[in-house]
């Protein structure tokens, strides 16, 4: 129902390598701070152009490219990546950055933040040898196609050798990024600055204290009927409904396109060009429905950024936790509400009159919120969803620590699913191959989904304090006040503020109790506990 968000400036993206000047290289002379700022602007725009091209290749590979076309694309990406690395590691770029840091008092707030972000990236990435930088980019291009085939054929052995290389690269890169951190902590920080295993262990323990007892109570209650969601729903009508949902959310289709992929994601290029994708299953009405709403939440974040951040190091959302807070907010807090169902149900009845002829609004609302431990993360309900993230978190910790071999992932995955969710995994396609993240090198990403989910209810509380009952508008199909509030508080800043600073400026100190209280209230009411 939701998936990946892919930054144009990924963690190894070209924004961040500014140079590896040698001691005997000449020192550049700058006529003025104004001249240096203009040079910084030109540098960032050049890197944006290269990164735009590389990212378009990835998007094409995931959407419309022939399945076995990776070889030629890989050669192009290899050359582009080599060019960007050479461009980025010119000594004069490092000197430019140092000069601006020395004259920080003459810089405006945005330029200081750009320099800060670029410096952080430089300190991390300049240690990566060029051959490793390029090899990793080529590997990820190949990995996407291998993963897709491995999932289709239920063949983990096909993907395993590629994944071993990805894990090895990430272990090495963790040392390059943050040599003073534990390797997995360093990777977590690439997606959510300040996040550590210690923090996550405490966070997940707090969630378990709420989730496990609630799941136990629900098992004893009468289960909600959702069988009608799995009738035959032709993809053609689902596509019409997707377009309707984008309109309802206020997504400008002149700046945001919807495509189809094996694994849904969002990719941003700038605030005038965002791509979202979905996947249609004719025997599952709500899979694509919530993919579109979720990815639409990512898109609204990107589309809502101020123009001044385009083509700079501040392009795009500030972290994956904040990004997932937006997508999960629209997907769950808005999309799974009674008010939203009231707004969209007439359209559903119009498109699927036979399938829903005996279904009313309340039946539909209850069905889309049914809680039951399941195999597939992106189909999971709000209550059990964090347990899926915990499985991936535990597997990743062990992979990076070297205590779990890639070949042993299926057995450990299946064990954890049984322990955490009480679910037997029938095959690897529905098990450890279900997500695309590892094929894209995104190790450390998954915890952002849980953190982002937990941010949402705290944002809702603050939103309702300022706006009153937002669900009256939602029931009328009007999300404009919701989106305007989020745009004002979150979206417009792009990466100008750090994630913790941004969240606390809106909501105060993060407290997971808002999330656990939200889950308890919602599911107690649904199941009359």
Image (cartoon, rainbow, N blue to C red):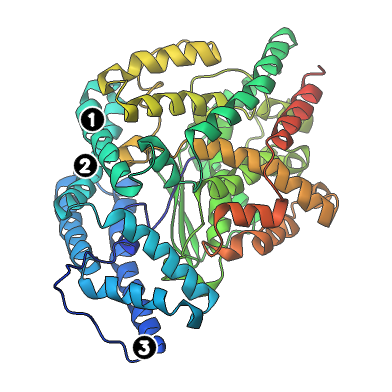
Q: Residue furthest bottom?
A: 31
Circle nearer the N terminus (2, 1): 2
Mark 3 or mark 2, whichever is nearer to me: 3
Circle nearer the N terminus (3, 1): 3
Instruction: Give percent across and percent down for residue 378.
Output: 51, 32
Pointer 2: residues within 10 angstroms few (<14), some, or many (20+)?
Answer: many
Q: Residue furthest right?
A: 468
Residue of label 2: 142
Q: Quadrant of the C terminus?
A: top right
For the residue pair 362 and 241, the one nearer the viewer reads as 362
Q: SS class of the residue under badge 2?
A: helix
269 sits to left or right of 133:
right
Tag of residue 35:
3
Residue appearing at x 21%, y 58% in the figure:
81
Q: SS class of the residue under badge 1?
A: helix
**Marks 3/1: CA distance?**
46 Å
Tag of residue 164:
1
For the residue pair 467 and 153, the one nearer the viewer reads as 467
Would you say residue 289 is visible in this rendering? no
Instruction: Give percent across and percent down for residue 302.
Output: 53, 60
Residue appearing at x 76%, y 31% in the figure:
517
Would you say residue 150 is visible in this rendering? yes
**Marks 2/1: CA distance?**
13 Å
Circle nearer the N terminus (3, 2): 3
């Amino acid at each position: 129902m939701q998936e990946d968000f892919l930054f144009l400036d990924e963690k190894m993206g070209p924004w961040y390598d500014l140079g590896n000047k040698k001691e005997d290289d000449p020192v550049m002379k700058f006529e003025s701070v104004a001249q240096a700022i203009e040079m910084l602007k030109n540098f960032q725009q050049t890197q944006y152009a290269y990164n735009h091209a590389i990212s378009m290749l990835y998007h094409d590979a995931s959407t419309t490219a022939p399945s076995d076309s990776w070889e030629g694309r890989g050669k192009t990406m290899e050359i582009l990546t080599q060019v960007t690395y050479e461009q980025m590691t010119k000594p004069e770029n490092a000197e430019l950055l140092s000069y601006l840091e020395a004259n920080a008092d003459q810089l405006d707030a945005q330029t200081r933040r750009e320099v800060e972000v670029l410096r952080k990236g430089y300190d991390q990435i300049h240690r990566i040898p060029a051959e490793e930088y390029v090899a990793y980019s080529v590997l990820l291009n190949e990995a996407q196609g291998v993963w897709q085939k491995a999932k289709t054929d239920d063949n983990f052995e096909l993907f395993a050798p590629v994944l071993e290389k990805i894990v090895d690269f990430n272990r090495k890169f963790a040392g390059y990024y943050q040599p003073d951190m534990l390797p997995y902590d360093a990777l977590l920080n690439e997606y959510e600055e300040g996040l550590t295993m210690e923090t996550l262990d405490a966070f997940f323990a707090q969630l378990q204290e709420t989730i496990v007892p609630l799941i136990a109570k629900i098992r004893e209650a009468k289960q909600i009927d959702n069988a009608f969601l799995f009738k035959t729903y032709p993809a053609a009508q689902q596509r019409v409904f997707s377009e309707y949902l984008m309109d309802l959310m206020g997504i400008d289709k002149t700046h945001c396109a919807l495509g189809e992929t094996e694994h849904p994601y969002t990719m941003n290029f700038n605030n005038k060009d965002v791509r979202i994708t979905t996947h249609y299953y004719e025997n599952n009405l709500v899979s694509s429905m919530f993919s579109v709403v979720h990815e639409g939440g990512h898109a609204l974040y990107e589309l809502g950024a101020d123009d001044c951040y385009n083509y700079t190091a501040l392009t795009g959302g500030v972290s994956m936790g904040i990004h997932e807070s937006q997508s999960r907010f629209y997907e769950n807090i808005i999309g799974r509400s009674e008010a939203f169902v009231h707004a969209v149900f007439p359209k559903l009845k119009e498109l699927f009159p036979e399938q829903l002829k005996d279904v009313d609004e309340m039946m539909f609302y209850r069905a889309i919120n049914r809680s039951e431990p399941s195999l597939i993360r992106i189909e999971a309900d709000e209550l059990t969803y964090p347990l899926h993230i915990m499985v991936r978190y535990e597997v990743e910790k062990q992979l990076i620590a070297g205590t779990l071999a890639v070949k042993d992932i299926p057995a450990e995955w299946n064990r954890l699913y049984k322990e955490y969710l009480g679910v037997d995994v029938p095959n690897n396609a529905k098990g450890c191959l279900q997500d695309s993240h590892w094929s894209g090198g995104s190790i450390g990403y998954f915890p952002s989904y849980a953190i982002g989910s937990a941010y949402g209810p705290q944002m809702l509380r603050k939103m309702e304090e300022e706006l009153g009952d937002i669900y009256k508008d939602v029931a009328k199909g009007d999300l404009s006040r919701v989106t305007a509030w989020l745009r004002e508080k979150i979206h417009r800043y792009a990466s100008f503020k750090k994630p913790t600073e941004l969240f606390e400026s809106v909501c105060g100190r993060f407290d997971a109790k808002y999330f656990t209280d939200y889950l308890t209230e919602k599911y107690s009411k649904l199941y009359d506990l």
